[in-house]
Image (cartoon, rainbow, N blue to C red):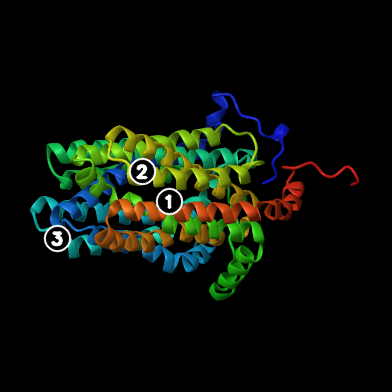
Amino acid sequence: MSERKEDIKYSSAREIFRALRHRNYRLFFSGQIVSLCGTWITSVASSWLIYRLTQSEWLLGLVAFVGQFPAFLLAPMAGVLVDRWNRQKVLLATQSVSLLQSLALAALTLSGAINVPWICFLTLVQALVNAFDMPARQAFVNEIVEDKLDLPNAIALNSAMFNAARLVGPSIGGVIIALSNEGICFLVDAISYIPVLICLSKIQIPPARLKYSKHHIIDGLKEGSSYAFGFAPIRYILILVASISLLGTPHLILMPVFAREILGGGPGLLGALMAASGCGALVGALSLAARRSVLGLGNVIKRCAFALGLSLIAFSFSTLTWLSMLLMFFAGAAMITLLASSNTIIQTLVEDNKRGRVMSFYMMAVMGTMPIGSLLAGTLASHIGAPSTVLLGGSAGLIIATMFSRKLPKLRDASRPIYIEKGILPKPASE
């Protein structure tokens, strides 16, 4: 996390994608980008379907809560199991169940039987799957990238992949909804899981590179918790990510309200707003992939936290479509750069046999607190309106950024010995 000008160098355009030289990572990347496009198509279709059926901001928040809160509850235990199990097999299982969930959602919608209870139930099923899928996916990257110097690049490319899909998926979803209905979106999502299952099945990992925890589940949970929250840099990054996810990101579930009520548009504008955020996130992730070193990421996180808060405050006052899209671009860039930088620092600090558990806490911070924020945002929006709700979230983001910036020097000092041990920083001359 140290900041030294000579260390902050950027790669050439060709080297931005250097992690793709690893065969296993290429397979993983290729399958995931197709599936993630389908996931984002379903995301925009689900939010539009709920709002079309109910006209309720509160139900938007409720369904988002149901879709994410189980990750908060199950993530620690899921992380322990992910450290004990074959992560490739875990991902094959979770992606298969996700395919079936999307098929069920498509069948109900196309038959006209869909309603809010069915949406909540199927969203809950997907949430339970994600509790295992997300930490497994994060930890799996470490197994499929042979050269650990390319691991930060692979993490950044994962973020770029996620947000490339976020850029393309909502736009496709908006067009499909306008031309047909939400059921076709869910069907497309189900089909998109087929490539990822094929690619996952083709990945080959030497047994010597697989490292699993052998602790009893309860002992493993205690060890993982003590490790993650006993080390200040990981602890404060997790707190930052959880706080931002709780207060700074639930504006996304209110996008149907802004698209329809504030800006006077329809599903096409909703897709455009989501795509603008995704485009900014893609640019942010690629700029992070261009970095050759993890050094200096602490300052990146600090600046992005401030930028996110300011973007959301400005967005809450905007009634112009072009300005709202521009602010969503900046908010998306700030948010994903903050999350990917935090992910990179944690992954470069954590020990391999605790990776699943620590990444489960990271995903708990990202996806677990977000539903609480979504429910809170939906409730507030129904009383004080969506713009005021986003204004409060942006203001809270500035407070969080200020608190983290004050802790940053101490976090750098605590990280330095590990970076020296791993060769990321040179040893002091006295040694």
For marks 3 and 2, the one nearer the N-term is 3
Residue 130: image x %, image y %? 38, 58
Residue 78: image x %, image y %? 47, 65
Q: Nearer the viewer, residue 185 or 49?
A: 49
Q: Which residue carries the number 3 mark?
A: 115
For marks 1 and 3, the one nearer the N-term is 3
Helix, strand or loop at mark 2:
helix
- What is the quadrant of residue 281 in the picture? top left
Q: Nearer the viewer, mark 3 or mark 2?
A: 2
Q: Marks 3 and 2: CB-CB under 8 Å?
A: no
Q: Which amino acid lies under the numbered mark 3 shown in the image of this protein?
A: Asn
Residue 163: image x %, image y %? 40, 39
Q: Which amino acid lies under the numbered mark 1 shown in the image of this protein?
A: Gly
What is the distance, in whole Å, between disc 1 and disc 2 at their CAs?
A: 9 Å
Q: Nearer the viewer, mark 1 or mark 3?
A: 1
Please tell me the numbered disc located at residue 315: 2
Please tell me the numbered disc located at residue 394: 1
Q: Which amino acid lies under the numbered mark 2 shown in the image of this protein?
A: Phe
As drawn, the residue found furthest toward the left would be 112
Helix, strand or loop at mark 1:
helix
Q: Residue at x 16, y 56 (%)?
A: 55
